[in-house]
Image: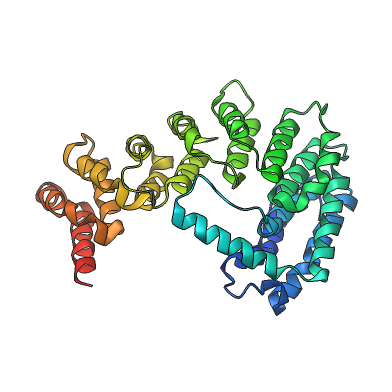
Amino acid sequence: MNDDPHLLREAESFYRDLAAPAWHFWRDREGAFWRTPLGHAARPLMLKFGRLVVDDPRPQVRARAAAALGTMLLPFDTGVDDPGSWPEADAQMREARTQIEQAYSTQSVSTELRETIQCLVTALGDKDAVVRRASLCALGCAGPSAQDSLSAISHLAQDPDEEVQLWIRYCTANMMRLDGETLEYLASKMVDQSKADSLRQASSSAMVLLYGIDRLPAIPKILRAIELYDPIVSESAIGTIQMLLCSAPVGSPFVAPAVQALFRALQYQRLAGQAAGALFYIGPAAVPFLIDGVRNHPERLVRLYAARALGRIGPAAQEATEALAELREEIDDDGIVSSALSKIGASKGR
């Protein structure tokens, strides 16, 4: 491999594809992923990536290997807990955390985890800032499992690179489960158009990764980021809103402003698909606001997207039937409204 940017991007994609099995950890109901053949194959890859981070002469390869390690280390975040989520989600996260702790309690996995983290700690002294940034991100992804690296991270306190400083804040917050001040810091960086695009993108990425912090109070700032209609941050902000408000409780004060922000984002071609998906993922709590959109929004496209979201919500959107029937009399491009009514009706009959 040479330093051609396209080949290096392909290399990162390759690393991430290899790292993907770690995500199955979350869905392994028996908590035994690392004892399966796939798990045994994935375990030594951590160390291989770790050695690349330390030993490869090309900074782009070192950084991309560290980025792949971040993906692999996410399941080792034993402190995963989101007090900003809803009660049923909290219970699921506690159960998942218990399974994860059981699944990698074997000495061999623990040894490989420690050695991998040590490689990333060594990379904190890399002369190239892009490698330091990626290594900090990967360490932060491991959460409290990597707390022993905090001392080494503190040695970067005077690093002149602003993105390095941002990832230090992320690491410290995710490892120590600090309060929401870090999220406020990240949100402020994300919407600051005087900052470099790469810093703002890093801010939005770090915000998504902060599993352990109550992010709900930061929703107004995240909505503001959507309404910048800036491709650097708007897509990440929509993804964050989708994650935070997924299956939100009916009556949540954050749903109405989020739906209105997503309606406005629908009018931008680059954001429309993602915004439409987020409307659906909010779930039943969004139904009254989607009905209002179907009936009263001045933009034809928004009304159709609202109808589609109601159809995807299904049984909980029964109250939208009348509004959708009225809309079908007026517009029904590609059968979108008829399909929504059919899905709601079919759901009702099940």
Q: With 261 as the anchor, is 321 left or right in this view?
A: left
Residue 320 x %, y %: 18, 52
Residue at (9% x, 50% y) in the render: 329
Residue 59 visible in rendering: yes
Residue 201 x %, y %: 60, 36
Instruction: Report which quarter residue 214 is drawn in.
Output: top right
**Depicted 221 relative to depicted 118: above or below:** above
**Depicted 336 relative to depicted 191: above or below:** below
Residue 131 x %, y %: 80, 42
Residue 18 x %, y %: 70, 65
Instruction: Report which quarter residue 262 is drawn in.
Output: top left
- 183, 88: nearer the viewer: 88
Residue at (51% x, 59% y) in the render: 91
Residue 7 visible in rendering: no
- 104, 197: nearer the viewer: 104
**Depicted 297 relative to depicted 17: above or below:** above
Residue at (53% x, 46% y) in the render: 83
